[in-house]
Image (cartoon, rainbow, N blue to C red):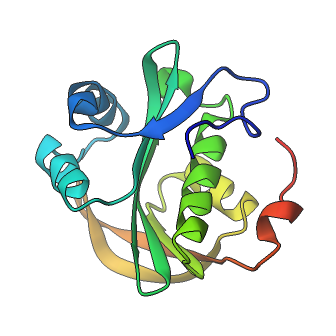
Amino acid sequence: MSALSADAAQSRATLRPMREDDLDRVMRIEVRAYPFPWTAGIFRDCLRAAYPAWVLVEDERILGYGVLSVAAGEAHVLNVCIAPEDQGRGHGRRLLRALVRAARGQAAQRVFLEVRPSNPNAIALYHDEGFNEIGRRPRYYPAHEGREDAIVMAKELLPDTLDRMPPL
């Protein structure tokens, strides 16, 4: 998968594998998007472990990125992020769909993710894309006032799921 062509009909954004030389730009987004960001070392470890990691690029500018883990027929969205100034334009949906396609391409039968209850926009996107809440992880995320639970969500990858997705 080298381009986001079908999903990006209204955008020039393309998807390509994340490279180690992208990490400075990825980190500039990460620290602006999250109060408790990943470190460059975490991203580097994911790349070295050959996790599927992608950047969404428009005119050489990284708009967002996603990192996936796939093993034993299951995928886990580890990080999906769009630069704050580029949110609300459908890029998160395009990137999430690309990660789901990558999971399917590696024979995953379901995809999991965690999301903060304090992130209603992400929760709405995940629900809209067919993810369902399956549980909670108590005190999973660091927070300014201690720890915050994680909502655990999952999506089954049925054979015709992609054909039935609504258009953007």
Decide if residue 103 is on the left or right side of residue 66. Answer: right
Image position of 44 (left or right of 152):
left
Give the residue at x 83% y 73%. Answer: 160
Q: Residue furthest top?
A: 59
Tell me: residue 149, above or below residue 60: below
Residue 91 lies, in percent from the top left, at: 61, 35
Q: Observer-nearest residue: 105 or 146?
A: 105
43 horizontally vs 133: left or right: left
- Residue 94, can we see it? yes
Give the x, y percent position of residue 59: 52, 12
Image height of 126 relative to 119, above or below: below
User: Which quadrant holds residue 137?
Assistant: bottom left
Q: Is residue 83 above or below residue 37?
A: above
- Residue drawn at x 78%, y 63% is 162
Residue drawn at (28%, 41%), measured in percent from left and top? 35
Please identify the residue farthest to the left as the structure is shown. Answer: 41
Point 18% across, 55% down: residue: 48
Q: Quadrant of the C terminus?
A: top right
Of residues 155 and 151, the one drawn nearer to the viewer in this rendering:
155
Residue 45, image x, y percentages: 16, 55
Q: Is residue 83 visible?
A: no
Residue toward you, 64 or 16: 16
Q: Which x, y percent locates residue 100?
A: 60, 61
Count all numbered tags in the image, as a single digit: 0
Q: Nearer the viewer, residue 54 or 33?
A: 54
